[in-house]
Amino acid sequence: MNKTVNQKAWFLVLPVLLLVAFSAVIPLMTVVNYSVQDTFGQNQFFWAGLEWFEEMLHSDRMWDALGRQLMFSGIILAIEIPLGIFVALNMPKSGFWSSFCLVLMSLPLLIPWNVVGTIWQIFGRVDIGLLGYTLDKLGISYNYTQDTFAAWATVVVMDVWHWTSLVALLAFAGLKSIPDAYYQAAKIDQASRWKVFRFIELPKMAGVLMIAILLRFMDSFMIYTEPFVVTGGGPGNATTLLSIDLVKMALGQFDLGPAAAFSLMYFLVILLISWVFYTVMTTLDAKEG
Amino acid sequence: MAKITLDNLAHSYLPNPKSEADFALKELNHDWADGEAYALLGASGCGKSTLLNIISGLLHPSQGRILFDGKDVTQSSTADRNIAQVFQFPVVYDTMTVHDNLAFPLRNRGEPASYVAERVQKIAQMIGMEDVLNKRARGLTADAKQKISLGRGMVREDVNALLFDEPLTVIDPHMKWELRTQLKSLHHEFGHTMIYVTHDQTEALTFADKVVVMHDGRVVQIGTPQELFERPEHTFVGYFIGSPGMNLIPASVAGTQATVHGAQVALGQRYGALSGDVKLGVRPEFVTLTDGDGLPVKVRRVEDVGRHKIIRADLFGNEINIVAAEGTEISPDMTRVAFDTAQVNVYVDDWRQQGEAA
């Protein structure tokens, strides 16, 4: 059978191309454009080459923000993944209470970011917030606007409150897919509860957990709204994470060149880490198979 | 190794069973003798697996008790009962090697490493997997995985009983035969009490000393393969065991004579007055197609299956099967069937009636 050759069909892709160009390619290229130029106002731009990139690579400010960012993502992953698994393991497997738990746990996921921020901002206030007031009355010094530790604790607990459900729901889906026969065989083999978890539940959850880690990592690495609403990056620079720093630089100081270079590197770092995750995941899969 | 006693046992998957129909397993009293190999035979969904899971403790019975050597274990956990069970579909621990899979039940009981190594080696040899011991179980084929499951079931020597729940379903036919032979020799060697669930009669008859036939949640007969063949206690046994199954012919019975559509059939025993749905049961092997005396039939079809011929015929509108020896000539004037009088059983409402000697 001869195929009809008709290259005119490419024109059908044109609307999508235009849309993507308008919404993604051109804005991104604008950023690239800013990152290689300098301006002294009056809309006059000068070629700056890779100067901004070099400057950012030698900037303590960016490295500090990156360090805080990695620490933040590390801490929330270390809490949310085990906690999510724990919650999933202890959820009712079926019936009314199972559905009830699922709905209850989905609720935090439905709340918009800045609302979550506002909730915790008020919740933690010593004068009118329930948490802050209670801690204060218990004699625990807690003031997230002045104390670095309190600020970090608030931001981390807020993220755990907001996102552990996602990990738990994914882990629960993984657990539900395990056939009963596995648990029966483990009983026959006289395996302990820990061994059931280690050799049946964990391997069967590995796939969804990898996805959970990837999602939570990317999302936490780009987090902006919640810590911004609660601490505004303070006290000092204590909770100034990468994206908060980036917005300060770009919109606060209007340093478009360095900010553009910064955001491109930020983008590349996320891309790189995600790629590493993905590669590790797929090779692990292949090795086991 | 233990004698397993089922006392007044019954199970329903419903929380509040009302009628007998709600029970997946109807009331049952039975002793599984220590060291004997049993086959549990029945159609799918007749309660075989339910019974097995109750014995191993995976399922808690709605009523009744289970005793091991006279000791009540109804409330004991699976681990306390120390039972090995192999399921229909392979269950392997994906992330472990074949070796670790086989060693798992022993290690869980804290057996010394040297003993574990020796047992694993022995079992690996039995299931023919010595060369893949260090491979991860995940990548193996379904029948290799099932062999691991079987191996895990056999690796402990001190189990009270070995339960098999249709373990050879996913194994290819050649290996099936070999594994069954292995299981038999294992039984001879260690004398474990074995219960083997299957819906394949060949498997049941070749494996077991005693066959337990279940139908609709009830044990209908327990006996040796020969007893099941010659004296099926229930029409289900007659129909389920044998290929083709037993012929059932509606009749009325008086004394040593049965009447089928006005024709007389001699019986081997004397029966009193029978009421209900009376049927004669004759195995195809005990029916002869003849040109002499007998009941009139219309031959529909003759199937040559190699070792013998199966004749499908019509007897007063009912199908009747006849098994004839390989070399038998079947001529057009053979229009009657004769029964081997001693092998004609009488059933009332599906249950066999015991007559008096004629």
Image: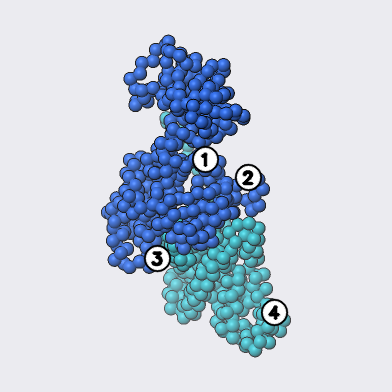
Chain colours: A cyan, B blue
In front of the other: B155 or B216: B216
Q: Secondary structure at mark 3?
A: loop
Q: Which quadrant of the view contains residue A102?
A: bottom right
* Residue at (56% x, 84% y) in the render: A148
What type is the residue that disc 3 sits on?
Arg
Outermost residue toward the top?
B333
Q: The numbered mark 4 sits on a residue in which chain?
A: A
How would you rate the neighbour count of disc 3 (Cα within 10 Å): few for under 14, some for 14-19, many for 20 or more? few
Q: Are marks 4 and 1 on the same chain?
A: no
Camera sees residue B93: no
How would you rate the neighbour count of disc 4 (Cα within 10 Å): few for under 14, some for 14-19, many for 20 or more? some
How far is disc 3 from disc 4 in space, using C-alphas?
52 Å
Q: Which residue is mark 2?
A: B20
Q: Which residue is mark 1?
A: B220
Q: Nearer the viewer, mark 2 or mark 1?
A: 1
| CB under 8 Å between discs 1 and 3 | no
* Residue at (62% x, 88% y) in the render: A141
Outermost residue toward the right?
A128
Residue B115 at x, y percent in the picture: 30, 64
Camera sees residue A151: yes
